[in-house]
Image (cartoon, rainbow, N blue to C red):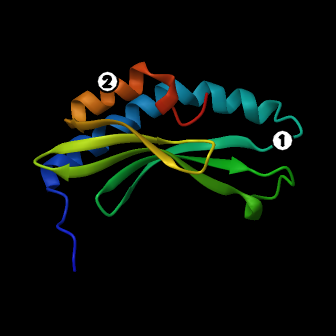
Amino acid sequence: MTTPAIPSLLQQQVDRWPAEWLQSKFSRLLKLRALDPGPFNYPIEVFPEWRGKAFYLCVRYRARSRRPEDDFIVRHTRMTLTGFGRFDLAYFRHTNKWFTFYRGLTAAECFREIEGNEVFWPTT
């Protein structure tokens, strides 16, 4: 069975928001971490990604080996389109399970929650 496509207007609205917010919120942090990465994995990039009907905020980490081929990606925040322009908002817990925090939010409401609640931030 095929899943219905995301309405293009809704996808454009969702795609516009993260570019500015991710840059303003995390660019300084990523630069500071790159200067002094320490002995552990550290974030090098924060980016948005669509996978089917879900929109993710992801983090690319540089592994302790410091080799780019060992980099890995963690999907941290998920907005799942449930229908009629509404999303379920979830974050990935340390238990390796998604925890849905809110159901039935508009895209704008999801953005407000993500910006205001650090639990949804891809890296802190």
Reading the image, the residue beneath label 1 is 40
Q: In which quadrant of the rendered view does residue 17 lie?
A: top left
Quarter of the picture holding the C terminus:
top right
Which residue occupies the foreground of this view, 40 or 81? 81
* Residue plotted at (44% across, 22% down): 117
Q: CA distance from mark 1 to mark 2?
A: 31 Å
In percent of width and height, residue 5 lies at 18, 65
Reading the image, the residue beneath label 2 is 112
Disc tally is 2
* Residue plotted at (83% across, 30% down): 36
* Residue plotted at (71% across, 57% down): 71
Crowdedness of circle 1 by 10 Å Cα count: few (<14), some, many (20+)?
A: few
In percent of width and height, residue 53 lies at 28, 59
Question: Judging from the image, what secondary structure is the residue with disc 1 in?
Answer: loop
In percent of width and height, residue 109 lies at 24, 28
**In the rendered view, does 87 fall on the left or right side of 89?**
left
**In the rendered view, does 87 fall on the left or right side of 77?**
left
